[in-house]
Image (cartoon, grey):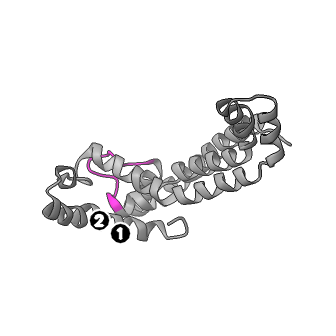
Amino acid sequence: PYIMSMTIVGFIWKFIFTQGFAKLFDITGWEALNLSWLGDPKLAFYSVVAVGVWQGLGFYIVLYIAGLKAIPDEVIEAAIVDGASPAQRFFRVVLPLLGPSMTTCIFMSLTNGLKVFDIILALTKGGPGTSTYSTTMQIYQEAFTNNNYGLGSAQAIIYFIVVMVITQLVLKAMSKREVDL
């Protein structure tokens, strides 16, 4: 799912939320499937989040698995010889050595969360009400719906600067926690 266009993913999930779950409700009778997933303000927000998580989860899992594979067996064996319990091995050996993978995943999750636009546009267009309205939706509407390109461009530049500052702060904080072998 990570390499698929988020607009296409959004339209697929919109079909699932509106028609797919309704069909499943007809078959199973489960009330949870008969909810207005994109029509209820609280559910719409969680639906957008769920689609975003679904889209990125596989990639993040691959990054963590690669990080786990990069941990030398000798380090784990040394912790066992030193008498470390499984919990101590995880928290004092494995987790610190997963720092680069964690930094990458947190960085990518943060930037993807800040620039989310296509899922929202495809699923809810910012609604119902403003429950899924984001800064990127505001920029889009200002520039292309209101035809105010100057203000939309200014908002986009300011938003870019804010995202850059947040990204740099997160990277700086996470790089302090990374451990080298």
Dominant SS in magenta: loop
Who's the residue at 32% across and 57% down the image?
124
- Number of other residues with Cα within 10 Å of mark 1, as a class: few under 14, some 14 to 19, many 20 or more: some
According to the image, label 1 marks what residue?
A: 12
Residue 146 rendering spot, x and y as whole percentages = 38, 59
Who's the residue at 79% across and 48% down the image?
73
- Number of other residues with Cα within 10 Å of mark 2, as a class: few under 14, some 14 to 19, many 20 or more: some
Residue 131 rendering spot, x and y as whole percentages = 32, 45
Q: Which residues are magenta?
A: 123-134
The stretch drawn in magenta includes residue 122:
no
Q: Amino acid at mark 2?
A: Ile
Relative placement, left or right, of 20 versus 74 is left
SS for tag 2?
helix
Q: Are marks 1 and 2 in contact (CB under 8 Å)?
A: yes
**Of 130 and 154, the residue lying toward us:** 130
Residue 120 rendering spot, x and y as whole percentages = 39, 57
SS for tag 1?
helix
Which mark, residue 16?
2
Answer above or below: position of 94 versus 31: above
